[in-house]
Amino acid sequence: MMYFARWKALAIIGVCLLGVLLSVPNLLPRESLPSWARQISLGLDLRGGSYLLLEVDTSAMVRERLETLVDTVRRGTAQANPRLLYTGLAANPAERRVTLRVSDPARAGDVARILRDAAISVNAGAGSQQPDIEVTTAPDGTVSATLTEVALRNKASNAVEQSLEIVRRRIDESGLVEALIARQGQNRILVQLPGVDDPQRIKDLLGRTARMTFHLLDEAANLQAPTPPPGTMFLAGERGQERYAVRRRIEVDGANLTDARAGQDSRTGEWVVNFTFDTVGTRRFADVTRQNVGRPFAIVLDERVITAPVIREPITGGRGQISGNFDVRGANDLAVLLRAGALPAPLTVVEERTVGPELGADAIRAGIISLAVGTAFVFLYMGLAYGFFGWIANIALLANIVIMIGVLSLLGATLTLPGIAGIVLTLGTALDANILINERIREEIRNGRSPIAALEAGYTKASGTILDSNLTNLIAMACLYGFGSGPVRGFAVTVAIGTIVQMWTATVVTRLIIAWWYRSRRPKELPVLEHPGLSLWHRLGRPLFRLVPDDTKIRFMRGAKAGVIFSAIVSTASVALAFYPGLEKGIDFRGGIVMEVRTPGPANLAQLRSTVGGLNLGDVGLQEFGAPDSVLVRLPVQADEAGTQRAVSQVRAALEQAAPGTRILRVEAVGNRVSAELFMGGLIALGISFLAMLLYIWFRFEWQFAIAGIATLLLDTTKVVGLMVVTGIEFNLTTVAAILTIIGFNANDKVVVFDRMRENLRKYKQMPLRDLVDLSINETLNRSIGTSMTLLLSALPLALFGGDTLAGFAWLMIAGIVIGTASSTFIAAPIVLFTGAKALRKAEPATPLGAPAA
């Protein structure tokens, strides 16, 4: 209806004003904002910083628990019955089991009882408790204790929660602000550090377990022996040169520390760490030092002996001092670790992405230029192609951008460079609904309807098509968000919000403005048709050009077989190219290290290649990257995640030594497991996207349309993949986002054509299917090409000004849009014709296109 009640009009205006109110805080300094105002945060790729993905090594907890059980058996049997003999006492971490064989099988129950007494109760759910180990005996005297699945899950979950809190405390103690720390998945922790362009110190702080324990030394052990005696372990000193025989039994646990501070020894002036115990620790420390005067007492940190002083006298005050040739930074970092507490299990950096502030500023500049140019292109196209109604669509587009920014601000979203790309692409998709409406209104006017009837019919008939076409895009974005990672998720959220908002602005805001205009002017005709007789000034309110003439009668289906055969050949060749020579996988999917560096002057590639190659880290790739002083360094994936982190540190140090003043602009390091997970996630996202669209189109249309839609999308995707192989565009998370976006947009275009076919099937009961398909394509030709044009105009600035990060994404988008527009006509429509020849309409001799069918 073109009539709006006053309350509806006020509500629409209120939503737009609310969008403005929520968006304005982004233009003001953060410190001047009221408490209720929220801003969009800039992602690390825009303001610089580090992204670290840490993994909790729960296997270390299993090993520690099993070693504790082994020690329990040794001490328990020695105290209970020294004559109780056994063999083969060992821990098997792979099977989560401790086994031994008692010489006298009749005494196996005694050992089993010792193990059962050492069991720890864990929560088994529903408020019940059960032991963490299951103890069994065999007739031959074999006793085994196995960690239960419930215990393992509890240990893993508790370890991640503990690690999360300790990581948070360590980062807070280090003085960093605005750090984001969150759990990701079952055993991973995400850490984002804005403004940190060299995260090595943070990685050192987070990578150390920092478990401090106090042990007596085994003075009778032979340090030259290849293996330590039972109950003893050989540990290296802090410098790695000394070797100590340390008893496994923990006399005092560092968990009983209440404080640790860096300071200077008043006698020697060296930096030390002073610590204080709680009540339990004080009592235990006093007992141990009182009973072992004259014996060495080792302070062990992460399986390294920091110091092993001889106990001169009992220490009863609960205070101690750690000395170990520290400098001021080392002493402070150790104090931070001890105050924050020990990690329950080691943490490994499995993924690192670091962007310097200089590169972030370049990304912001590229994003703003792309957004400004894309907006200008799209605005001019709509105003000149659709006249007065096109300028109204531009007003709705402005409202769409403002409301979208307001919603992102309300959600406290983080804007990344792919997110900016999502906003730019939303410019093109946001006008799709307006093009549909305007083309419908124009069609109704040409069919002789009155202005008010044409407006009503235009909005009413286009609404269903708008909903169908945009839901396919939302399905693609949901799949991308569900299986994507990091900034790619931000892209999915931005596009999804923009899609939802644009459906509202296109169908409601423009309708309200046109209703006001119509009520005030009461025009006898609508300015939707060209009028060459008017002056240029008066023609500005009317369309100035048409991409395709009206009333085209192109016989597209005459080339139906040729189009499908040609498409099949190209797609088959593309699939073959995908296997050989294969896609160029980016670091996201193959793992490895990529570093972008900037040297003080033009880079000496030969010298840098020789320097990095001398580190023996595998095949090294160095190339100039955009400028003579910018170099891209590529290294293959290392044996494990720890090796990857060591390689990053070695390359950083080697480059700075070879070319003093070299700045590290960007670091991406992805380990084997993460790259495999990301690759599988990308494939799953593509597969689920296809399946979801198949089901949706099948639900909304006849099965022939669903088959045609999904087959065409598969053919479109394979062509895009073939293009990636030929052009060398990397297959990474960003290009997966581009492919899914292409799938969504191309499905959008096909749904519009299918919708017109379905409408014409009801309208022309006797028209042969071949003629009906041709008629439907001709009727929607301007809409298809017009929407593709707005998308191209919004994607082209990304390709030209978006920088190297988004260039591949944007060119892939442009190619996908062209491929999808052509496939709607020459592939999807012929498949509907072939599969629906009998079911949709009985085949009849073709009649001239446009001739009366009934």
Image (cartoon, grey):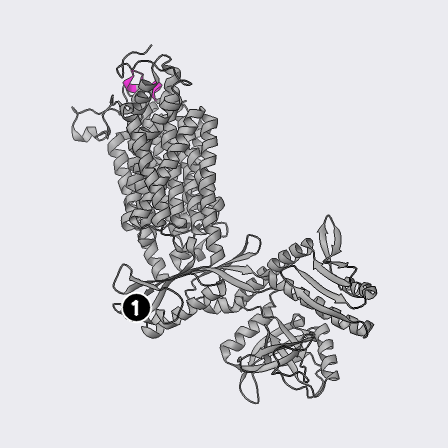
Is the residue 776 above or below the residue 121 in the image? above
Q: Is residue 258 left or right of residue 490?
A: right
Image location (x, y in percent) of residue 560:
30, 26
**SS majority, magenta:** helix
Image location (x, y in percent) of residue 805:
34, 53
Is the residue 661 above or below the residue 674 in the image? below
Asked if one can make out residue 643 in the rendered structure from this viewpoint, the answer is yes
Asked if one can make out residue 821 in the rendered structure from this viewpoint, the answer is no
**In front: 226, or 379?**
226
**In front: 204, or 178?**
204
Image location (x, y in percent) of residue 255:
66, 70
Q: Residue at x 47, y 53 (%)?
A: 676
**Quick check: is 446 in the magenta stretch?**
yes
Q: Which residue is drawn at 18% across and 31% down?
A: 537
Residue 230 falls in image quadrant: bottom right
Position of the N terminus by quadrant:
top left
Residue extending farthest to the front is: 140
Is the residue 26 above or below the residue 853 in the image? below
Specify the segment rendered in magenta: 445-454
**Quick check: is 327 in the magenta stretch?**
no
Residue 792 falls in image quadrant: top left
In the structure shown, which secondary structural element does the residue marked by tag 1 occupy?
loop
Position of the C terminus by quadrant:
top left
Q: Residues within 10 Å of mark 1 (few under 14, many from 20)?
A: some
Q: Name the residue under label 1.
A: 599
Q: Is residue 300 left or right of residue 665?
A: right
**In front: 749, or 685?**
685
Residue extending farthest to the top is: 854
Is the residue 443 above or below the residue 49 in the image? above
Image location (x, y in percent) of residue 215:
67, 78
Amino acid type of the residue tagged 1 in the rendering: Thr
**In front: 428, or 287?**
287
